[in-house]
Amino acid sequence: MTDLMSSSSSNDPLLRLLQETASNDRDAFRLLYDSSSAKLFGVILRIVKRQDLAEEILQETYLIIWNKANSYNPSLGRPLSWMMTIARNKALDTLRGLEAKSQTFEYSESDDAPIQSALLAIIPETLDSTDRMSLQNCLNEATEQARESVLLAYIHGFSRDELAARYSVPVNTIKTWLRRALIDLKNCLER
């Protein structure tokens, strides 16, 4: 799995489009949008749970991508991963801004799609179905608390403070839970 994740992005068509976008090529930017917007929209929608808000955040995300395309560094990851990080951060920032205005985000078990579909929104496209299934199996092997805290943190965008309040434990305990859960997932995937 690590070979897939660390492979060079030089063959990635998004790399060329992102580089051309950095040179203010509007046609390349349009193709970049067409090639990646569905994936980014899925990431955003999973976090904010509202289509209208997700559409607005998607547009803001692409404005950021247009303005920061020249700062993308291929040695730090694939173009889609970079764009997904921007989308996720923008969605989380927007969600936190809404919460600050007393519009709280409520999580319920009924909101949680099956693990497989939740993961597909954030797992790099470089993973084949076997690797995705391995990750799902490892999550299924995790304790309910570990699985839920990882999904809430990394899929639904809960902060450590929000998780601490949810579980009525200190923030440092949450940090420990997440660290252990990620180590366990890594060890499981390496088997």
Image (cartoon, grey):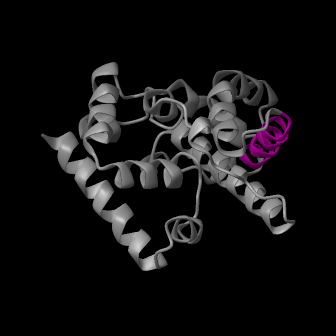
- Residue 151 image point, x, y percent: 47, 47
Write down the quadrant of residue 52 in the picture. Answer: top right
Marker count (numbered): 0
Instruction: In this rendered view, identify the residue nearer to me: 184 or 9.
Output: 184
Q: Residue at x 87, y 66 (%)?
A: 101
Instruction: In this rendered view, identify the residue nearer to me: 17 or 104.
Output: 104
Q: Is residue 49 magenta?
A: no
The span picked out in magenta is 52-66
Q: Residue at x 77, y 58 (%)?
A: 104
Instruction: In this rendered view, identify the residue nearer to me: 58 or 51.
Output: 51
**The N terminus lies in quadrant:** top left
* Image side of residue 175 versus residue 105, left or right: left
**The C terminus lies in quadrant:** top left
Write down the quadrant of residue 129 in the picture. Answer: top left
Q: Residue at x 31, y 26 (%)?
A: 133
- Residue 185 image point, x, y percent: 27, 48
- Main SS, magenta residues: helix
Q: Is residue 56 magenta?
A: yes
Considering only vertical position in the picture, is 187 above or below 24? below
Instruction: In this rendered view, identify the residue nearer to me: 12 or 37.
Output: 37
* Image side of residue 171 versus residue 48, left or right: left
Q: Is residue 19 visible?
A: no
Considering only vertical position in the picture, is 14 above or below 179? above
